[in-house]
Amino acid sequence: MKYGIALFPSKKLQDLVNSYRKRYDPHYALIPPHLTLKNSFEASDSEIKDIAKQLDAISDQANPFPLKITKVSSFYPVNNVIYLKVEPNEQLSNLHESLHSGFFSQESEYSFVPHITIGQRLSDDEHSDVLGQLRMHKVKHEEEIDRFHLLYQLENGMWTVYETFLLGKES
């Protein structure tokens, strides 16, 4: 089965992102707005139990952190993805690193650029137009993140939560 690890922002931010995603992101109906912490990977039913134990240990060692959005940006010319830029911080970077080392080590296709996708698979012209429009809007948002989620993909392509992990030892 295919799994992934992500965090979900507040409903307020998800509503804002979805107002764009429904027009510009073909994955809109498959998964809510999210920040990917670990790209999709395959695991068996027995492997996922060990993975969940490891994630629980990682979540105990990580602390809640601020999620700060400062602007709209793009991965152009690598690909035509438009996103909300999440300002990197030490806690987020440490969490990402923990999910890509030791038990979880594997090569990552791209460097970690924390973001929440607004649009993807756009033509060059559409990408340019949409990015130009969105950059005119001031985007400032900050909230506290206190959990991340292990997700799995259903047969119809939709992603759903397998287990949620609270950050910090108090949880």
Image: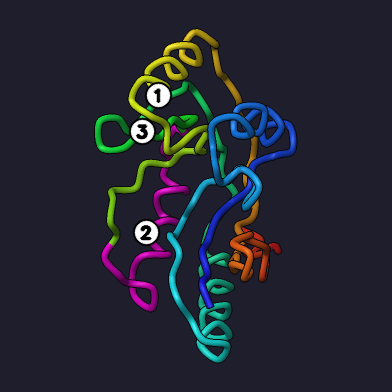
| Residue 32 left/right relative to 124 | right
Front disc: 2 or 3: 3
Mark 2 Cα-neighbour bin, 10 Å: few <14, some 14–19, many ≥20: some
Name which quarter of the figure residue 167 lies in. bottom right
Q: Residue at x 67, y 27 (%)?
A: 19
Give the labeled residue for mark 1.
Answer: 127
Mark closest to the chain's N terminus, 3 or 1: 3
| Residue 63 left/right relative to 112 | right
Three-letter code for the amino acid on which mark 2 is drawn: Glu
Element at label 3: loop
Give the labeled residue for mark 2.
Answer: 97
Q: Position of residue 58 (x, y in %)?
A: 51, 68
Element at label 1: helix
Name which quarter of the figure residue 103 lies in. bottom left
Front disc: 2 or 1: 1
C-beta proximity under 8 Å, tags 2 and 3: no
Indicate yes or no whether the magenta region holds residue 46: no
In the image, residue 60 sits, relative to residue 22, either above or below, namely below
Q: Position of residue 90 (x, y in %)?
A: 41, 45
Image quadrant in which the C terminus is located: bottom right
What segment is highlighted magenta in the picture?
A: 86-107
Alpha carbon of mark 3 to alpha carbon of mark 1: how far?
A: 6 Å
| Residue 3 left/right relative to 11 | left
In the image, residue 88 sits, relative to residue 140, either above or below, namely below
Mark closest to the chain's N terminus, 2 or 1: 2
Three-letter code for the amino acid on which mark 3 is drawn: Asn
Q: Residue furthest top?
A: 136
Q: Residue at x 53, y 85 (%)?
A: 50
Mark 3 Cα-neighbour bin, 10 Å: few <14, some 14–19, many ≥20: some
